[in-house]
Amino acid sequence: MTRDAGGATERTPRISIILPVFNGGRHLEKTIRCLLAQTFDDFELLILDDGSTDDSPNIARSFGDRRIQVRTQSRTGATEALRRLLAWSRGEFVARADADDLYAPERLERQVELLHGDRDIGVVGAQCELIAEDNQPAGRRWFPCRDGEIRRMLRLGSPLPHPVAMFRRDLARNAGGYAAEFRYAQDYDLWTRLAARTRFANLPEVLLRYRVHAQAITTTHRQEQVDAHRGIRRAWWATLPAEEKAESRWADELRETIEGERQAFGDHFDAERLTTELFRRRVSEANVAFGARRDDVGLRCLAELARLTGERSFALARLAAQAVGFRRLWQAARLMKRREFVAQWRDNPLAEW
């Protein structure tokens, strides 16, 4: 409970939806309407207009719903707007929303259910459908659902889609909230700081329709986003154990190489070929180590691959087996405690390899 300016008792909402807006008038009304149509209705919708020059403030104020609160300010940028919104929020949970995206009616309900049911989880996202300016489907983006998978992806970039993220307010505030020094990738920075304090999850269903358009920050400031992610990523690695640092460095090499090839070859980019080539390169390094009787180094190279290549590990392991042999692959899987690979490799006849 809180008190308003007149001293009357006012009920604290369960969720604070924080929505920064800058010249979002084209899609803002549709976004607000889908938020007001949520099946979970115990929320406040906090809209902060960040110096818009279009009709965004008037659109935000045009709804006769007491759950909506609107403030305006001179232009500060997205990070400072988010910092002020987080400070303004009162709910136990904070739900992010963007002014040009659309949300499934059950979005808040599903996320609250998960956070309420598992106190160890502090941040939850969901899957995303991409849409064009005219709301037509433009693809999908899938994110890992389990904490361990999310943490592995966190070494390379953000595994939690920010526009549909919900987190515990006090958890984020105690970690320092959104850091003022990051104009871009402020969500990724926050997730890396929360990693030592909580567990993560993504729901398996699509709860966000993410609009792709020429004015989006991810389009207009793509290089700044990439540079910010790289700086945050490498600073966070400094806090990791030595073994995880080594894995992260190789994962970063993989990411940087793929990104470079994607930019160079455009529509002719062949991710499958490149991934296989990088796998061969790492296997070659392992084989050299085995030849020098440094089995510990060779096994570690293979173990990194078993973790980093995810579902493709077993298929790609057939290539590795030709160079280093079945027994060493099995030892590497045991080293990384990858039980599913240990079982498959143990049960497969050596003739297959």
Image (tube, rainbow, N blue to C red):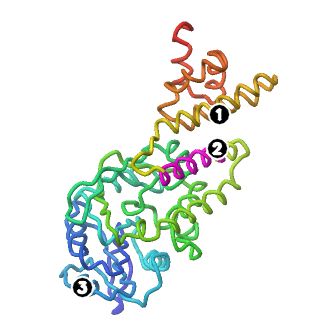
Of circles 1 and 3, which is in front? 1
Residues at circles 1 and 2 in contact by the CB criterion of under 8 Å: yes
Q: Is residue 309 above or below residue 178?
A: above
Residue 250, disc: 2
Amino acid carrying label 2: it is: Trp
* Residue segment shown in magenta: 249-264
Residues at circles 1 and 3 in contact by the CB criterion of under 8 Å: no
Q: In the rendering, at what x and y percent does residue 75 appear?
A: 43, 87
Residue 133, disc: none
Per the model, the C-alpha gap separating discs 3 and 2 is 50 Å
Q: Nearer the viewer, residue 33 or 77?
A: 77
Q: In the rendering, at what x and y percent does residue 3 appear?
A: 37, 84
Q: Is residue 15 left or right of residue 333?
A: left
Answer few, some or many: residues within 10 Å of disc 3's Cα (few below 14, many 20 plus, some between 14 and 19). some
SS label for mark 1: helix
Per the model, the C-alpha gap separating discs 1 and 3 is 57 Å
Q: Nearer the viewer, residue 77 or 112?
A: 77
Quarter of the image that includes the N terminus: bottom left
Quarter of the figure with residue 281: top right
Mark positioned earlier in the residue sequence (1 or 3): 3
Mark positioned earlier in the residue sequence (1 or 2): 2
- Residue at 53%, 74% (x, y): give it: 183
Amino acid carrying label 1: it is: Arg
Q: In the rendering, at what x and y percent does residue 346 appear?
A: 56, 13
Answer few, some or many: residues within 10 Å of disc 2's Cα (few below 14, many 20 plus, some between 14 and 19). some
Amino acid carrying label 3: it is: Arg
- Residue at 57%, 28% (x, y): give it: 338
Residue 61, disc: 3
SS label for mark 3: helix
